[in-house]
Image (tube, helix red, strand yellow):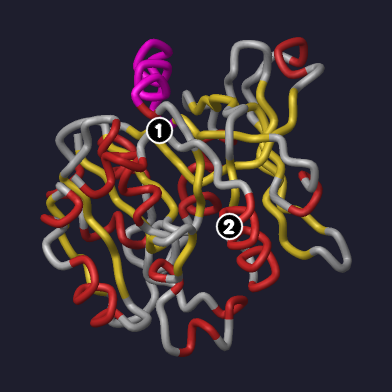
Amino acid sequence: MKALVLAAGRGERLRPLTDAIPKPLVEVGGRALIEYPLGMLKRAGITEIAINVHHLAGAMQSALGSGARLGIDIVWSPEPALFGTGGPLSGLGGFLGTDTFVVANSDTILNLDLAAMIAFHRDRGALVTLALAQPENLGAYSAIEIDSAARVRRMRLLKSITPLAFDDYADARAHPDCAAHPATFMYCGVIVAEPAVLKLAPPAPPWSIMAGLVAPMVRDGLPVFGRAHHGYMRTVDDLAAYERLRAEFAANPPELDFLDLARR
């Protein structure tokens, strides 16, 4: 299996820090933020990993190189302009398009059992499976609703917080009883997908992986599932969240069982 780690964004909500340092390289717990998802992938046996880059791309490539220091093989995917969260897939069909693959955010730390998630995905014959969580501030994110069989039946993609507004994508083919009492989650930064989904993607970037691919699949009744993650999960949304995370790691670092793998 192969993976794509999304790392091209400007990290504007971490400015002024990200004026000089790309967001994936900011330090948390004595290592670059991106090393956490890379370690998670490596624990699942995924070592061939594409990383898209745009903002301060040279710093990213200098810091990680070929990936040999981390025991992985990095394929760099430079973007002359930002392609969005889905756009990198448009140019990586040859790299990803032969087997089940993973897409992971570079700004999320979670102690996810990715191997179990991949097994869950395959057992259900899913085209896409999303890692989901229920944080205390769930209302600040897009809402993903799953039924009792873990199938995604509605996605409410956040358009704005003030005023609160969503774009709704509901599975029009679902029997009303199937989604009468859905559980609501947020997406927490990891997708498992089949290569067939690449044929459903918009033809050219920029495009969003949620609004451009996954949500329309839900609307059209295609097999999109969600797997709830109940373990450790932190997302670096802004500078305040970053400072809280640094303080947490300094005072009481979480037990993340893939950390030793990240540097072997």
Does 34 lie within the magenta span?
no
Spatial separation of the CA atoms under disc 1 and disc 2: 18 Å
217 to 82, vertically: above or below: above
Between 244 and 223, the one lying in front of the other is 244
Residue 168, position in %: x, y? 71, 45
134 to 207, vertically: above or below: above
Does 122 lie within the magenta span?
yes
Between 204 and 114, the one lying in front of the other is 114
Which mark is drawn over residue 257?
1
Question: Over which residues does the magenta segment extend?
Answer: 115-128
Q: Quadrant of residue 46?
A: top left
Between 232 and 7, the one lying in front of the other is 232
User: What type is the residue that disc 1 sits on?
Assistant: Asp
User: What type is the residue that disc 2 sits on?
Assistant: Ala
Helix, strand or loop at label 1? It is loop
Q: Residue at x 52, y 34 (%)?
A: 131
Q: Quadrant of the C terminus?
A: top left
Residue 43, position in %: x, y? 29, 33
Whether tag 1 and tag 2 are in contact, CB under 8 A, the answer is no
Q: In which quarter of the image is residue 8?
A: bottom left
Horizontal side of residue 260 vs 246, given as left or right: left
Q: Which residue is drawn at 11% across and 55% down?
A: 68
Q: Which residue is drawn at 28% across and 46% down?
A: 262
Horizontal side of residue 80 vs 116, given as left or right: left
Q: How crowded is mark 2: few (under 14 residues within 10 Å), some or many (20 or more)?
A: few
Residue 111, position in %: x, y? 48, 35
Which mark is drawn over residue 187?
none
Work out whether mark 1 precedes mark 2 in sequence or the reverse, and give the earlier one. Answer: 2
Which mark is drawn over residue 250?
2
Mark 1 against mark 2, which lies toward the viewer?
2
Between 167 and 118, the one lying in front of the other is 118
Q: In which quarter of the image is residue 22?
A: bottom left
